Amino acid sequence: MPYLARARVRADTAHAITQIRRAIDDLLSAHGASSFADVSPLQRMWRDSNTAGRHAVIDPLVNQEVYGKALLGVPYEENITPLI
């Protein structure tokens, strides 16, 4: 896959993860404090999504920068991460 397409996939993935985390936060707010009980499935979803959403490969700010630089034609070597 070409570099620009890979950068776009990373940016799109980061955006999707951000939207998922926001949706889960909305569910937690609607459900109240009991959402954080150990037996609550929402607590597990919240914990898992927040843990995964902070992984370097899908960090929204990193991926937006990578994609922006790719769109501007900044050479691959000048990217902020060698993961792409």
Image: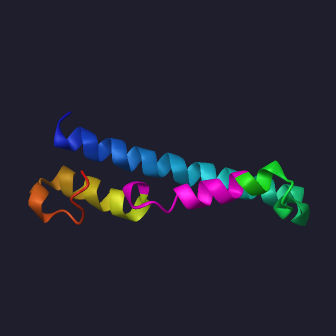
In this view, 33 is above or below 14: below
Q: What stretch is highlighted in magenta?
A: 45-58
Q: How is the image coloured?
A: rainbow
Q: Position of residue 12 (x, y in %)?
A: 41, 44
In the image, residue 76 lies at what x, y percent?
12, 55
Residue 62 painted magenta: no
Q: Which residue is drawn at 52% across and 57% down?
A: 53
Tell which of 16 and 39 is nearer to you: 39
Give how far across and how far down residue 10 sits, in percent.
35, 47
The percent coordinates of residue 17 (x first, y second) are 53, 50
* Picture quadrant where residue 80 is located: bottom left
| Residue 18 relative to residue 28: left or right | left
**Residue at position x 85%, y 56% from top?**
30
Residue 53 belongs to magenta span: yes
Q: Name the side, left or right, on which 61 lies relative to 16.
A: left
Image point 19% across, 52% down: which residue?
70
